[in-house]
Amino acid sequence: MQRGVSSVVQLLLLQGCLCAVATGYLFRTPLDLDVTPRVTVLNSGLQGCRHFQSSAVNYSTMLLEADSERLYVGARGAVFALNASDISAGSALTIDWEASPEQKHQCLLKGKDNKTECFNHIRLLQRFNSTHLYMCGTNAYRPLCAYIDVERFVISSQPEEGRDKCPYGPTTGYTALIIDQQIYTASQYEFRSFPDIRRNSPSPTLKTEDAPTRWLNEADFVGSVLVRESVGSSTGDDDKIYFFFTEISQQQTPTYSHSRVARVARVCKEDRGGHLTLQKRWTSFLKTRLTCSLPEYDFHFNILRSVFALPGQTPQDTFFYGIFGLEWKNVKASAVCRFTLSEVQEAFQGPYMENQDSGSKWKEYTGKIPDPRPGTCITDALRARNMNFSTSLPDDVLNFVRRHPLMSKQVEPADRRPLLFRRTTDYTHMGVHTAQGLDGQIYYVLYMGTDEGWLHKAVDIKGQLHIIEELQLFEEPQPVNNLLISDKQWSVYMGSPSGVVQLPLSSCGRYTSCYDCIFARDPHCAWNGAECVDVVMQADRSTLIQDIQHGTEGCENTQGDVVHRNRSVRVGDDVLLQCELSSNLATPLWMLDGRQVQGYDLNSGFRTGTDGLLIIDARQDQSGLYTCYGVENGVKVAIVTYNVTIRLDLHPPPPVDPTHGFAITRAPSEHPPTEKSKPPLLSPLLPHSDLLSPRNMKAIYLSLITILGGLCVVLTVVLIYVGFCLRVGHRGKYSIRAAAAAHQSGKKHHRNRKQHRNSTTMELKTISSHCNGNGICNGSSKMHNGNIQDGGLLQIVPGEGHTSPSNEPLPPAPPLPPTPQLTSPGCDFSNGLSATLPSVLRRMHGNSYVLLRQSDSENMSPPGYSFAEELNKILEKRKHTQLLPRPDESSV
Ligand SMILES: *[C@@H]1O[C@H](CO)[C@@H](O)[C@H](O)[C@H]1NC(C)=O
Ligand SMILES: *[C@@H]1O[C@H](CO)[C@@H](O)[C@H](O)[C@H]1NC(C)=O
Ligand SMILES: *[C@@H]1O[C@H](CO)[C@@H](O)[C@H](O)[C@H]1NC(C)=O
Ligand SMILES: *[C@@H]1O[C@H](CO)[C@@H](O)[C@H](O)[C@H]1NC(C)=O
Ligand SMILES: *[C@@H]1O[C@H](CO)[C@@H](O)[C@H](O)[C@H]1NC(C)=O
Ligand SMILES: *[C@@H]1O[C@H](CO)[C@@H](O)[C@H](O)[C@H]1NC(C)=O
Ligand SMILES: *[C@@H]1O[C@H](CO)[C@@H](O)[C@H](O)[C@H]1NC(C)=O
């Protein structure tokens, strides 16, 4: 029977191998571009975080005025004035501005959603003049605008009609600027109307043209920027406004089958429209394509989600940063591309496109271009030729403009490729801060919010982004709706559906050792010999250590704090030597008495995991001095040493203070240690091999079969799906690469939790549901009951006593998937129970097991701290944690 079962197992293992090989073969394309954030900080671990919340929701507009230290925030039905240095301080000034019940009723009658759309969402909130702000709200599908008296913070006038400057819906693409008391807006205002870029009163109202050539096609606007390009002009007559959007491409060319494209369009600020032709229309409208792609992988990021303009020394040095996504809504991926103003200008100076036969054929226009060049602003040069306003432009120029809105030259990113590509993240908004490194270079630091409420801080190093950290802003996943940076307040502000969060631009104190500080490569941080400090706060910078370019040098002579621990266990126990690396980019390396421990070899009796070394079925010859190193950027840093003594004695160890580490051992009664010295047959899949009493064997085999079978079924499904997608086209190509990257990252022991979770749940969801009632997990659920039942079940007992220095610099809490169960409310979280509780169901080279993490200091553990309780919590978490075998590991 047993032999039969095991041959079935072998068969399945073989099949598993084949599956894995097949997947490995198909998913081979490497995607090293996909950047892993170095450090993951959960909501509970955020430092210096401030929160603003009220009864209102949907904090979607923000206006920061550094001089007055005020942050104005527009939400659903309310506007707030917050203290920008601390948004949680004091009571916020508030203006309530709800849609009337009658208007809400009207909205409902129009068939709109009374849970989202039939409210007054503030969409525009900007400075109008020195005393007033201007705001517009959707007002339950009947937009209204009003002035705010800043001094008293009240609405100072009767609200006015807003339908020509504000969209009707809360999520309609929209951008607005108020410049010199003129309101420039772009949106598809009403559901059925054409998208339009408008300038509203007081000066002549201007719009985009719809016929014979439609200038905009279902444009989805994300941003607009004024660039004061005028050189030597006091009137700013060459200043232009750039609009960023995604639209349907009318252009059908063999190279681009994509229906949507990212665009930049521009108009002259002083445009007054034409006289007869283009009356009340822009005479300076031009648009072109923004490209952001990985051509070697055939990835074209056609959707522009957000744009950030970084002013330079002169207007010419302006950078536009764009967050791009793929066209398919169900595929998460983001790319960040950077464009220079001069290249955008160059495109607008280049050849025009022409629409032939008024069909979908667009070709580069090669005929004569009228003079003055269509689309130019009225400057002194034209005024000298008696063309004082755009209304005096010749008719042939205006006619040309009317029919040639599109330029032929596309704008490529400044670096000819994305700065960043992320597979599993949808960035929503970003901001850029410049910082001077100690090496004298200017570094661009990017803050990017995600659709799940994380903030990524990244630094541009030679055209590549290194993600310094990922911060969980909210416990409940929710999109970052807005992001602003204040250098003066040293803060980044983010709006979301539930509130506004303020974080400092840097938290260097998070890095506890010199190497940690250097590896971070954060231009804001440097090591001063004792701690990692904010560079800007330091008067004397001569002794500071920083290495942004390589992240390796400067710490050679500093004394790292290596934690020393003693462990004493019995022969046959499973011992976990903990070593948690705070960096997702570090890999662990274990040495035993100076020799490297082969933790990946299945017969070695060791397993190297991301959080420690497991000695399975300890033998006496495994005693010795173990040292754990974290290897990052090619540098080996000792973190902890364990003096492990493995004793041959049968008595259970005496109970010790539970805050001190654990060894995993077995109930001694049924299994004398001698029986267990043979290597466990199934140890790769079942680390606790002593579960294998004959009675349990069958159940375990069966569950194993179920798991492997399920895995194969899923893999097969994935393969079929992938194959199908391949034929479908680009989407398929993407899926393959996504999986390839997951595969790759699995191999490299990347420990980005979010990423890992996403990739595995995508492909292997069914396994976990299988697992929940079976095999390994079944063992755990018995443990859950706290009983030791038949067959010598696992028991978790405290390890041998050892004391540790009270102020050990242990690395911060390990990265975890952002499941709500794992954190506790609020940013201003004080170290409570859940912080000291371990976290984790970790994986050791493909195995799942329960790990109890010891707390870092004793005073953190609450009195009456029970193991059963802790175990329950872990198991509870385990239920929600879907960490699954990866395809490449199923074959072992
Ligand atoms: C904002 O808060 C800071 C400190 O919390 C305080 O010093 C400052 O006066 C406040 N500013 C305003 C405008 O209330
Ligand atoms: C929305 O309208 C439905 C009826 O159409 C009603 O049952 C529901 O209570 C309304 N919800 C709110 C929040 O007003
Ligand atoms: C600002 O604009 C408002 C609204 O038009 C007006 O009432 C106010 O007088 C203006 N303030 C100044 C200083 O011009
Ligand atoms: C343009 O302005 C100049 C001086 O401001 C004036 O002399 C000239 O007549 C104007 N031309 C037109 C066509 O209005
Ligand atoms: C507003 O917030 C709610 C939750 O607070 C969310 O469900 C909804 O999608 C948000 N709407 C917009 C337009 O952001
Ligand atoms: C470990 O044991 C040695 C002696 O065996 C002792 O000197 C040392 O203090 C112990 N270290 C810790 C951290 O307990
Ligand atoms: C390890 O501990 C044993 C006794 O527990 C001691 O004899 C030995 O010297 C220790 N080794 C080191 C390197 O501390």
Image (cartoon, grey):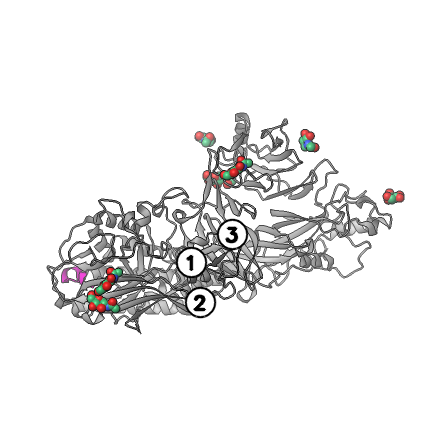
Quarter of the view holding residue 683: bottom left
Q: Give the label, 1 or 2, closer to the camera.
A: 1
Callout 2: few (<14), some (14-19), or many (20+) C-alpha neighbours within 10 Å? few
Q: Give the label, 2 or 3, closer to the camera.
A: 3
The kind of residue tagged 3 is: Met
**In the image, residue 268 lies at what x, y percent?**
73, 47
Please give the residue where the numbered disc 1 appears in the rendered image.
Answer: 530
For numbered disc 3, what is the local secondary structure?
helix
User: Marks 2 and 3: CB-CB under 8 Å?
Assistant: no
Whether residue 66 is visible to the viewer of this picture, yes or no, is yes
For numbered disc 2, what is the local secondary structure?
loop
**In the image, residue 188 lies at what x, y percent?**
62, 42
Callout 3: few (<14), some (14-19), or many (20+) C-alpha neighbours within 10 Å? few
The kind of residue tagged 2 is: Asn
When the figure is inspected, residue 11 is found, relative to residue 738, above or below; the finding is below
Q: Quadrant of the C terminus?
A: bottom left
> In 3D space, how far apart are the residues under numbered discs 2 and 3 (Cα atoms)?
28 Å
The kind of residue tagged 1 is: Ala
**In the image, residue 171 lies at what x, y percent?**
54, 42
Residue situated in front as seen by the camera: 623 or 587: 623
Which span of residues is magenta-colored?
689-697
Please give the residue where the numbered disc 2 appears in the rendered image.
Answer: 633
> In 3D space, how far apart are the residues under numbered discs 1 and 3 (Cα atoms)?
15 Å
Q: Which residue lies furthest to the bottom in this view?
A: 595
> For the image shown, how many numbered marks are present on the structure?
3
Is ligand 6 less than 8 Å from the beta carbon at label 1?
Answer: no
Which mark sits nearer the N-terminus, 1 or 2? 1
**Label drawn at residue 786:** none
Q: Quadrant of the N terminus?
A: bottom left
When the figure is inspected, residue 112 is found, relative to residue 603, above or below; the finding is above
Please give the residue where the numbered disc 3 appears in the rendered image.
Answer: 537
Principal SS element in the magenta part? Answer: helix
